[in-house]
Image (tube, grey):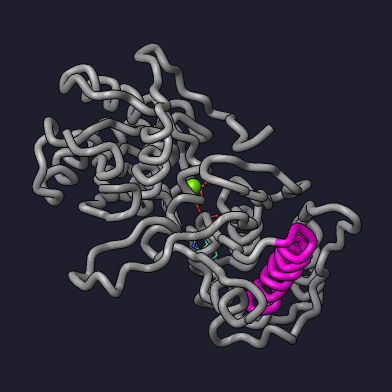
Amino acid sequence: MSELTDARILAIESSCDETAAAVIENGRHLLSSVVASQMEIHARYGGVYPEVASRQHVLSIGPVVEQALTQAHLSLAEVDAIAVTRGPGLAGSLVVGLNAAKGLAIGAGKPLIGVNHLEGHIYSSWVYADSGHKSDIPAAPQFPLLALLVSGGHTELNLMTGHLTYRRLGATLDDAAGEAFDKTARLLGLPYPGGPSVQSAAETGNPFAFRFPRARTDGAWDFSFSGIKTAVLREVRRMQANGVAIPVADMAASFQAAIVDTLLAKTLAAAREFGVSEILVAGGVSANKALRAAFMNQAEFKVNIPKFAFCTDNAAMIASAGYFRYTQGDRSALDMDVMPTWPLSS
Ligand SMILES: Nc1ncnc2c1ncn2[C@@H]1O[C@H](COP(=O)(O)OP(=O)(O)OP(=O)(O)O)[C@@H](O)[C@H]1O
Ligand SMILES: [Mg+2]
């Protein structure tokens, strides 16, 4: 057993189509992170096929956990607690990770900590991998901060005044940002997964070629992305009707610019309004190069964005969030159930 602040957390994540395990020390220092992706399998279906996902988790979970411990050079007895994603996500996928975590906790006599997947995304900004130089350790995010969560199923702005506290200021009224990328990719005939393929198509496109709408939700901190997607659809249909070849790169670049502008403008406005000095961006869409550049290029606020590898689903982020819950005395019962829908804050 380590001192509380040096605690080592073994975490499991299986909320969607990634089977992942990781070990983190002191909430930030990554000892190992293993992700078994099912992306190629689901690409055949153009999206995640839930039953296939849960059965793949069954196959991968044992080897992935074993590998995470091996890479960390630790035995199960040497970790202090087991953290696991409890939700939100696909029930059949969550169950596999949760039951594996319960087995490990019982077998090794370690505490079990259920973690919200969205909280995990936020805590990915605390994770760092060792370079061997103390001076390379990035500063931890400082409170109060404004957290923009942009993932496949969620888009929301939360004010954090301390660890594990969230005041939701606003959220998307329709599609999540990642969902908008995925749907637009389909409209443009780009392959699954949509976000990365829109990004690479956009690289050779002109972001000013089309002026897609920047939805205003005045007076509120909410977002709306369905209008942008519908505008793309209308343009595609118009061109098809006229027998015009679709300028995929220009449309992808213009769509991406509309999403990035919308996210940046609202986040900056909220950051000013609530007097924070730092912004945090998290979730799969934070892997987007244009989004990262837009946030990093403004000089008003310090921006925390996870390292690329920790933007999409992984277990390092669950281990980090699990650590802060562990040090606060948070423990879950062995009869804990999954929570397929579980808001970060109510
Ligand atoms: N480079 C990118 N540009 C834009 N979007 C991206 C990029 N990379 C990933 N995404 C999007 O991120 C989403 C996946 O993120 P993430 O893994 O966090 O979602 P999820 O776990 O399915 O949903 P949630 O976290 O809301 O439960 C997908 O919608 C994907 O298209
Ligand atoms: Mg996710």
Q: Position of residue 241 (x, y in %)?
A: 80, 71
Q: Residue furthest top?
A: 335
- Compared with 252, 69 (above or below) is above
Q: Position of residue 171 (x, y in %)?
A: 73, 48
- Can residue 261 be found in the magenta stretch? yes
- Compared with 63, 284 (above or below) is below
Q: Residue furthest right?
A: 219
Residue at the spot 32% in from the left edge and 68% down from the top edge:
137
- Compared with 16, 220 (above or below) is below
Residue at the spot 66% in from the left edge and 82% down from the top edge:
250
- Can residue 61 be found in the magenta stretch? no
Of helix, strand and loop, which mostly describes the magenta segment?
Answer: helix
Along the horizontal axis of the image, is 307 left or right of 101? right
Split into 4 quadrants, where in the image is the N terminus? top left
- Regarding residue 183, the answer to whether it shows in the image is no
Residues rendered magenta in the picture: 252-275
Between 4 and 191, the one nearer to me in the picture:
4
Along the horizontal axis of the image, is 257 left or right of 132? right
Split into 4 quadrants, where in the image is the C terminus? top right
